[in-house]
Each structure stands twice: as structure tokens, then as C-alpha cells.
Image (cartoon, rainbow, N blue to C red):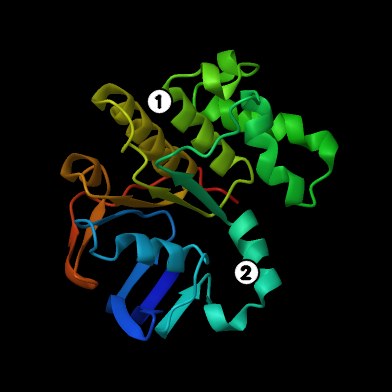
């Protein structure tokens, strides 16, 4: 079943009367449960595309449908609600609160969720267990290694059990060993729990962990190829 439908999507930035196209009419679909890497050099448009797919920005042309609804069909409030409840975000820079422990960092998305507070600790603990950091529950993020911080960021993205996880260069600040551990977690979340994963990267090795790679160049799709057979799972997130 299709989760994301993109047709002729474009984004142009205007600065002092000068227009700069960042995306030039890209089209593709992403199915539920897919693991897709969007790959390209700096300036190729991959970060712009992530912002559009994650409802962090609006396109200047084309159409984008998420879960059967076009972006123009959502109010700003609905966009924020979908972004919080159905989307999880993992960034290169972790974006953790440094003097706050792992549990409290992971609980942050729950503050705006409408979920009763009595359930927060259990939900956060389950997400932390999923990334193998239960033994670091009460440690401040500043006491963790880079790889552990990224795993906390993944747990935070997981805590509301989102439909899709957007990972923007998640291994960019990590050594190779930590990077492989983070990618193994993302693969496991996709394979055993059914999360759709959209990975933004410029690294060939990292991209090859996905089932499919969309190559961007100068704001256009240069290639869209399957690199692995589609994973199947009986444990999709409900």
C-alpha cells in the first residue's frame, strides 16, 4: 500500500528577487514498510526533499500526498499533528538536551501528544529498550558517546510509534563502528516492526543498507533502483 505519492514536486527559493530552484519536478511513490535511501551530493536537493516530505516546508509546485491526503488538504494544525504523531525525525546533530537524562529526552514528543502523562514513562522505556539503551536510562546525554546519543535520538523518534521515520544523515557525525550500529537499528525497526524508513545520505555504504536508492542530482531524479528484495514482516506498527 502506498504511503507517499509525489508528482512533479518542485521547490524554488527566492532571495532578493533571485530564484534558485532546489527541486525540479520529481515524481515517485514510497510504499508502507519500505526502506528507501535518498542519495546525492551536497546541493542535489535531498535535504529540501526531506523538508517537504516531513511537512517542514511546502512545495512551490507539483503534488504531495501522504497517507492518501494532499498536503494542501491539511490545515497548519493538522500538519503539525501528523508530523508529531505519524512521523519521527532523526538528525545528524542528535538535537538532545545535554543536561537531561535519556528518559526525559525520549519523553519530549509526548508533551504535545495528548497521551495521559501516566503512560509516558512506559512508552519512553519501551522505545529506549528497542535501541538497546535501557542500561543508560538515567544518564545525561552529555555522558553518552556519539553512537549512544544517536540511539537516544532514534528512541525519541520512535516513542509515538510513527508510521515513518525520516533519518537525515544519521551516521554523519559517527565513527564507522557506531555508524554501523545505528544502521543496524534502523534496519531492525524496518524489518521486525514495520516502520517505513526514509534515509537521507551522501554515503554509498549507508545507502546500500536500504532496499531502494533514489539518486538526486541538481534537483532531479537521476536514478531510482531496487538494491535489495522487499522485506516482509508480521510485526507492522498498528
- For the N terminus, give its image quadrant: bottom left
Q: Where is residue 49 in the image (x, y as percent from the top left)?
A: 37, 66
Upstream in sequence: badge 2 or badge 1: 2
Q: Which residue lies furthest to the front in this view?
A: 16
Q: Residue furthest top?
A: 135
Residue 119 falls in which quadrant of the image? Answer: top right
- The residue nearer to you, when weighing 196 against 113, is 113
Q: Where is residue 210 in the image (x, y as percent from the top left)?
A: 27, 47
Q: Label 2 crowding class (10 Å Cα cut-off): few <14, some 14-19, many 20+?
A: some
Q: Is residue 138 above or below residue 61?
A: above
Q: Position of residue 58 (x, y in %)?
A: 49, 75
As helix, strand or loop, the secondary structure at mark 1 comes to: helix
Residue 109 falls in which quadrant of the image? Answer: top right
Residue 79 disc label: 2
User: Which residue lies at the image location 17% right of the left edge and 61% below the top edge?
Assistant: 225
Is residue 153 left or right of 220 when viewed as pictured?
right
Q: Is residue 1 above or below residue 144?
A: below
Residue 85 falls in which quadrant of the image? Answer: bottom right
Q: Name the residue under label 1.
A: 147
User: Which residue lies at the image location 44% right of the left edge and 44% below the top edge?
Assistant: 91
- The residue nearer to you, when weighing 226 against 71, is 71
Q: Label 1 crowding class (10 Å Cα cut-off): few <14, some 14-19, many 20+?
A: many
Is residue 107 left or right of 151 when viewed as pictured?
right
Is residue 97 among what the camera can see? Answer: yes
CA–CA distance in space, label 2 to label 1: 31 Å
As helix, strand or loop, the secondary structure at mark 2 comes to: helix
Tag count: 2
Is residue 141 left or right of 112 when viewed as pictured?
left
Q: Where is residue 101 in the image (x, y as percent from the top left)?
A: 64, 23
Amino acid at each position: 500500500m502506498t504511503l507517499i505519492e509525489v508528482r512533479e514536486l518542485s521547490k524554488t527559493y527566492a532571495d532578493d528577487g533571485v530564484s534558485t530552484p532546489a527541486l525540479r519536478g520529481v515524481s515517485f511513490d514510497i510504499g508502507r514498510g519500505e526502506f528507501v535511501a535518498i542519495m546525492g551530493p551536497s546541493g542535489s536537493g535531498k535535504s529540501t526533499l526531506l523538508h517537504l516530505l516531513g511537512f517542514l516546508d511546502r512545495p512551490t509546485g507539483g503534488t504531495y500526498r501522504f497517507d492518501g491526503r494532499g498536503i494542501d488538504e491539511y490545515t497548519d494544525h493538522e500538519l503539525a499533528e501528523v508530523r508529531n504523531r505519524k512521523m519521527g525525525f532523526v538528525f545528524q546533530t542528535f538535537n538532545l538536551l545535554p543536561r537531561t537524562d535519556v528518559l526525559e529526552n525520549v519523553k519530549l514528543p509526548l508533551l504535545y501528544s495528548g497521551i495521559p502523562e501516566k503512560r509516558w514513562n512506559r512508552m519512553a522505556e519501551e522505545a529506549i529498550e528497542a535501541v538497546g539503551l535501557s542500561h543508560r536510562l538515567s544518564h545525561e546525554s552529555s555522558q553518552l558517546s556519539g553512537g549512544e546519543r544517536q540511539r537516544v535520538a532514534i528512541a525519541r523518534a520512535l516513542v509515538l510509534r510513527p508510521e515513518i521515520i525520516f533519518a537525515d544523515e544519521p551516521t554523519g557525525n559517527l565513527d564507522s563502528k557506531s555508524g554501523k550500529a545505528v544502521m543496524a537499528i534502523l534496519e531492525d525497526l524496518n524489518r521486525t516492526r514495520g516502520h517505513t524508513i526514509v534515509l537521507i545520505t551522501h554515503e554509498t555504504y549507508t545507502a546500500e543498507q536500504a532496499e531502494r536508492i533514489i539518486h538526486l542530482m541538481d534537483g532531479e531524479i537521476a536514478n531510482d533502483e531496487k538494491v535489495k528484495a522487499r522485506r516482509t514482516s508480521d510485526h507492522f506498527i498498528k
